């Protein structure tokens, strides 16, 4: 074996050893937090710690083995980060379950249901790695993915299956299960945007007409994807789900900018966003309320609808301080929907600002690894797809954490891998599988192309000539 091959093999083994070490740390975070919940609330280690820890370990080990077998060169950091976040989220949900049960509420099975959804997510994670051997095959389904994404967004409008929960019509109910089709739609639209932009990148990068100081492409090139984006945005606005509208708009803008490398699109997008925000504030009462709650939270504390949720969350995080009150030492149940939209406030109250910063750092590392995958990817479709999937995480985390901390108005998105929600958790596990598949393709060593030794061929040709 050559020295280059030996060095690459050594680096590969070291990378996998580091991944295994990080996975052990991630499991320690999840199982340790679960044990701390029992000690903090009940004064003893939970009786089901062995069963819970064993099941969580089995899921993470199964995911790790699938990566080692079917994507051996994939990024070694993504899976441990996801395992740590998911394990911490399960522990926080268990902490809330115990309090809800003690107060006589029916909502005391969030952790158990979330573990079930995590199991389904890991199964789909493994199936994605097994069945999708080359991410470039998804490019053949560009328009199919776009159409399927739009149809999924329309499903909540269908009578009989669509649900209107908390003022937003974004859920459907089938066979007794609630599901949010927009979580799957965001993955499909990333594939659709990436497939279209990689095919028309050259045309989109060429100036069709200069307006002021922005070079706009030809309408016939940009028309289809603008129509797709416009339809999806219209559906989301009609559903009163402005958080997802912001997510999809930002996703489209980021991928368009990366594909064309034209900063003018950022200016155009900013102006469009400002115009859309003003129109929504003027027309949609829910948006106006959320802006008022954000600007003057204490003035609307006792009203319905009001800002009580935001104020209680800010009081709790302020009480938690730098290191928190300890798991079981706070009152996160005072915050409505502490198990979903406001789970970060629970972490801030009981584990402190330090844990919140650690969570934000984990999300930042996920986005950084996604962008690193995009940089080293050898094909344009993989680059755009990795950027899009990374942008989904970045925008969603910014929107939800910004809303909980009072940086921006509340929008109602879930915190990836932490919040309770089956459709979000399953979709995010699939997103990580897609990133690992692109990463494996990008990091896989290029086959060596050694120069052909022509001396043997020349000697043989000379012998044939002499015989003739």
Image: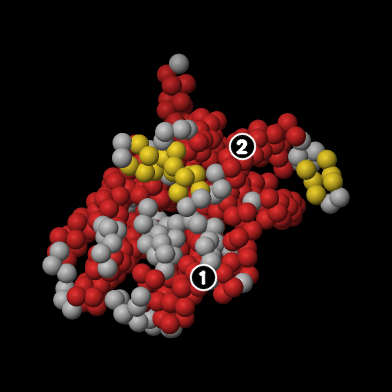
Disc number for residue 329: none
Reading the image, the residue beneath label 2 is 231
| Residue toward you, 80 or 338 | 338
Badge 2 local density, few (<14 within 10 Å), some, or many (20+)?
Answer: some
| Residue toward you, 396 or 234 | 234
- How far apart marks 2 and 1 lie (CA) works out to 38 Å
Q: Quadrant of the C terminus?
A: top left
Question: Which SS class for mark 2?
Answer: helix
Residue 29 visible, this angle: yes
Where is residue 43 shown, x and y percent of the image?
A: 18, 78
Query: Given contact means CB atoms under 8 Å apart, are the residues at marks 2 and 1 in contact?
Result: no
Disc number for residue 302: 1
Where is residue 250 shown, x and y percent of the image?
A: 61, 52
Left or right of 392 on screen, residue 266 = right
In the rendered view, would you say 167 is above or below 341?
Answer: above
Number of numbered discs overlaid on the protein picture? 2
Question: Which SS class for mark 1?
Answer: loop
In the rendered view, would you say 159 is above or below 110?
Answer: above
Image point 42% across, 64% down: which residue? 336
Badge 1 local density, few (<14 within 10 Å), some, or many (20+)?
Answer: few
In the rendered view, would you say 326 is above or below 126?
Answer: below
Where is residue 267 shown, x and y percent of the image?
A: 74, 55
| Residue toward you, 78 or 422 | 422
Left or right of 161 on screen, residue 209 = right
- Closer mark to the observer between disc 2 and disc 1: 1
Image point 34% across, 78% down: which residue? 330
Which colour scheme appears in the figure?
secondary structure
Residue 405 visible, this angle: no
Where is residue 255 shown, x and y percent of the image?
A: 61, 48
Image point 39% across, 71% down: which residue? 334
Image point 50% across, 36% down: which residue? 157
């Amino acid at each position: 074996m050559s020295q280059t091959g030996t060095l690459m093999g050594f680096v590969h083994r070291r990378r996998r050893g580091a991944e295994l070490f990080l996975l052990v740390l991630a499991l320690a975070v999840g199982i340790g937090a679960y044990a701390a919940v029992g000690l903090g609330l009940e004064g003893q280690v939970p009786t089901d710690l062995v069963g819970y820890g064993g099941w969580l370990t089995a899921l993470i080990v199964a995911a790790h083995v699938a990566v080692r077998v079917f994507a051996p060169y994939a990024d070694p950091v993504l899976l441990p980060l996801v395992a740590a976040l998911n394990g911490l989220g399960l522990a926080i949900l268990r902490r809330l379950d115990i309090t809800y049960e003690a107060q006589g509420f029916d909502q005391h099975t969030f952790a158990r249901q979330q573990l079930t959804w995590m199991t389904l997510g890991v199964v789909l994670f493994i199936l994605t790695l097994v069945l999708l051997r080359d991410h470039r095959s998804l490019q053949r389904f560009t328009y199919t993915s776009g159409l399927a994404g739009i149809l999924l967004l329309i499903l909540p409008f269908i009578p009989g299956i669509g649900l209107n929960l908390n003022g937003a019509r974004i859920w459907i109910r089938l066979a007794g299960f609630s599901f949010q089709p927009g979580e799957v739609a965001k993955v499909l639209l990333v594939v659709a945007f990436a497939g279209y932009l990689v095919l028309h990148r050259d045309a989109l990068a060429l100036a069709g007409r200069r307006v002021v100081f922005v070079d706009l492409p030809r309408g016939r090139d940009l028309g289809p994807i603008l129509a797709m984006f416009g339809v999806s945005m219209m559906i989301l606005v009609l559903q009163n789900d402005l958080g997802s509208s912001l997510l999809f708009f930002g996703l489209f803008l980021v991928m368009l900018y990366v594909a064309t490398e034209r900063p003018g699109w950022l200016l155009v997008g900013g102006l469009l966003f400002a115009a859309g925000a003003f129109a929504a504030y003027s027309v949609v009462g829910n948006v106006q309320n959320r802006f008022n709650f954000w600007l003057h939270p204490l003035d609307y504390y006792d009203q319905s609808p009001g800002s009580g949720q935001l104020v209680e969350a800010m009081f709790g995080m302020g009480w938690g301080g730098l290191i928190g009150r300890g798991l079981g030492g706070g009152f996160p149940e005072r915050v409505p929907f502490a198990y979903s939209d406001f789970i970060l406030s629970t972490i801030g109250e009981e584990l402190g600002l330090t844990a919140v910063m650690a969570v934000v750092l984990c999300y930042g590392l996920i986005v950084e690894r996604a962008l690193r995958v995009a940089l080293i990817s050898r094909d344009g479709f993989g680059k755009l797809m990795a950027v899009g999937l990374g942008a989904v995480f970045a925008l969603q985390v910014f929107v939800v954490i910004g809303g909980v901390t009072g940086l921006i108005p509340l929008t109602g998105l879930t915190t990836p891998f932490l919040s309770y929600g089956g459709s979000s958790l399953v979709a995010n596990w699939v997103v990580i599988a897609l990133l690992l598949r692109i990463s494996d393709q990008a990091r896989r060593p290029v086959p060596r192309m050694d120069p052909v030794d022509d001396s043997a061929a020349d000697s043989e040709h000379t012998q044939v000539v002499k015989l003739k």
